Image: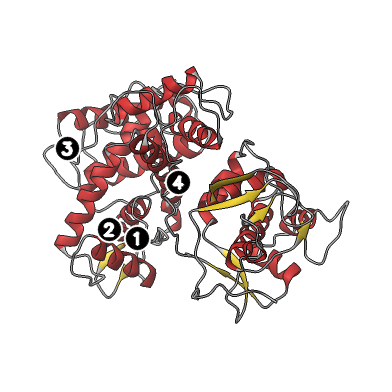
């Protein structure tokens, strides 16, 4: 029988969770860590990062649900303990203090940390019992069994239903309570040793992949050493903070913001249909808006969703349906605009200005653009619009791989520098080098960008249509 928390009617994602490093009655250390980092730690301790995606997701749903169940029911605190969960698998699930996190698990948890399993008609998260299924059996999910089911083509929800029954749901978009309130309470500096140092090190190393000026930190552990101090100083310099080498509250939150935003932006915005997959005649009959404009709006909404929790991400499908309308309304509410769900001139300008402000702060390697359809607008010197900005972003990334193409700073203004970059691209890839972006050049830039950004990176002469050998 579950214990209902007085006054609590809905499940929320807490900012942190306190873990007892031992059996419930065993004298042991308690550690308090951000909830999302706890889930990543347990998943990295319990499952193998090379398992199929559906298997990983099913297991992570179970891990999240167990943790939320312990918090929601106050399983331990109602029994007089001063922690939320233990790290012993006899009672709960494995947690290893200061351990590293696998990249595949890190990515998935960022995506679904606010989702959990629940029985239909119930409120509390399911205590989703699991075991490895090889050395131990249980009345729940077999971890190795999820691998076999995933290899058979089952999606995560079907895997969970296989083990826990047909009467389960996956609740999504659970409210996050004080999620950003993760600051350790006092500045981190040279010589400190704690789990917050480890979190900051991992975050800075991830950020450094997109900001190469930030030196990689080694080793990754919980000690604030000289290599970390150097990375902190460079981070502070890049993001206009006082260069002290100390992680004060402002630096801590800036690190967390950039880490989460860059990862989420890359994950969300890289999704999109290939040009060949979108029918050319799709038109939104309500608004008369053709696919290219709707796609661009959807991409902008996804960029904004990485920075504003109130704005939900959407599928980039070119269709102005209920999902996209709902996201537009949330954007309008966030910016105190009239919430109509329609893309009027005021909304469009506010959306573009907001996205421009975000993307101009990121290097091209930190941005992942979808395959946007040709907007039916010829872009040439003197044109100022969002479509120019998109072409500039595409060319800016291509120039990091193909040095013959001059770099251009994206600003939405088609000036001489942009024209020169377009002409260089056209020469390299066998097009008429007129510096004008019509449909053929637009599609070629998009295709080459996606080949370089998401596929195998090859020398220019290896691409179809190029005149360089």
* 452, 297: nearer the viewer: 297
Q: Secondary structure at mark 2?
A: helix
Location of mark 1 (residue): 311
Disc nearer the start of the sequence (2/4): 4
Q: Nearer the viewer, mark 2 or mark 1?
A: 1
Task: Using the rendered view, name the quadrant where residue 436 is placed.
Answer: top left
Find the distance from the CA under tag 2 to the CA under tag 4.
Answer: 39 Å
Disc nearer the start of the sequence (3/1): 1
- Relative to 280, 168 lies left or right: right
Disc nearer the start of the sequence (4/1): 4
Q: Secondary structure at mark 3?
A: loop
Find the distance from the CA under tag 2 to the CA under tag 1.
Answer: 19 Å
* Percent x, y of residue 421: 26, 29
List the single residue furthest toward the left: 382
* 248, 450: nearer the viewer: 248
Location of mark 2 (residue): 293
Location of mark 3 (residue): 414
Disc nearer the start of the sequence (4/3): 4
Find the distance from the CA under tag 3 to the CA under tag 1.
Answer: 30 Å
Q: Residue at x 48, y 34 (%)?
A: 200
Find the distance from the CA under tag 4 to the CA under tag 1.
Answer: 22 Å
Task: Using the rendered view, name the quadrant where residue 293 is placed.
Answer: bottom left
Find the distance from the CA under tag 2 to the CA under tag 3.
Answer: 19 Å
Location of mark 4 (residue): 182
Note whether residue 468 is visible: yes
Q: Nearer the viewer, mark 4 or mark 3?
A: 4
Which mark identifies residue 216?
none
Dots 4 and 3: beta carbons under 8 Å?
no
Q: Nearer the viewer, mark 4 or mark 1?
A: 4
């Amino acid at each position: 029988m579950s214990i209902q928390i007085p006054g609590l009617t809905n499940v929320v994602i807490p900012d942190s969770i306190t873990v007892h490093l031992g059996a419930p009655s065993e004298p042991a250390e308690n550690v308090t860590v951000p909830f999302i980092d706890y889930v990543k730690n347990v998943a990295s301790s319990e499952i193998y990062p090379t398992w199929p995606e559906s298997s990983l997701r099913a297991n992570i749903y179970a891990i999240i649900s167990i943790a939320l169940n312990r918090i929601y029911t106050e399983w331990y605190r109602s029994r007089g303990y001063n922690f939320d969960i233990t790290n012993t698998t006899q009672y709960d699930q494995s947690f290893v203090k200061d351990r590293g996190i696998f990249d595949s698990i890190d990515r998935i948890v960022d995506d679904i940390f606010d989702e959990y399993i629940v029985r239909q008609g119930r409120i509390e998260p399911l205590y989703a019992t699991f075991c490895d299924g090889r050395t131990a059996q249980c009345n729940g999910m077999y971890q190795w069994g999820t691998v076999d089911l995933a290899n058979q083509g089952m999606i995560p929800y079907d895997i969970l239903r296989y083990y826990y029954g047909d009467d389960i749901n996956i609740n999504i978009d659970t409210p996050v309570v004080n999620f950003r309130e993760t600051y350790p309470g006092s500045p981190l500096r040279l010589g400190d040793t704690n789990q917050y140092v480890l979190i900051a090190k991992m975050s800075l190393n991830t950020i450094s992949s997109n900001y190469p000026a930030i030196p990689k930190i080694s080793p990754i552990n919980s000690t604030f050493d000289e290599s970390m101090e150097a990375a902190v100083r460079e981070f502070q310099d890049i993001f206009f903070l006082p260069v002290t080498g100390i992680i004060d509250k402002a630096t801590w939150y800036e690190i967390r913001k950039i880490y989460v935003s860059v990862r989420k932006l890359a994950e969300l915005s890289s999704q999109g249909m290939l040009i060949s997959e979108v029918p050319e005649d799709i038109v939104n009959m309500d608004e008369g808006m053709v696919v290219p404009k709707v796609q661009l709006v959807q991409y902008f909404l996804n960029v904004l969703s990485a920075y504003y929790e109130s704005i939900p991400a959407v599928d980039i499908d070119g269709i102005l349906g209920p999902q996209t309308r709902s996201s537009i309304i949330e954007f309008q509410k966030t910016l105190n605009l009239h919430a109509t769900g329609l893309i009027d001139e005021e909304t469009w300008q506010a959306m573009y200005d907001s996205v421009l402000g975000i993307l101009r702060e990121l290097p091209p390697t930190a941005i992942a653009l979808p395959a946007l359809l040709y907007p039916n607008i010829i872009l040439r010197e003197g044109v100022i619009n969002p479509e120019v900005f998109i072409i500039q972003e595409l060319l800016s990334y291509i120039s990091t791989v193909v040095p013959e193409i001059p770099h251009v700073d994206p600003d939405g203004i088609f000036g001489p520098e942009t024209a020169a970059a377009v002409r260089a691209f056209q020469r390299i890839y066998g097009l008429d080098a007129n510096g004008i972006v019509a449909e053929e050049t637009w599609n070629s830039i998009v295709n080459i960008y996606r080949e370089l950004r998401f596929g195998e990176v090859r020398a220019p002469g290896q691409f179809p249509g190029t005149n360089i050998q």
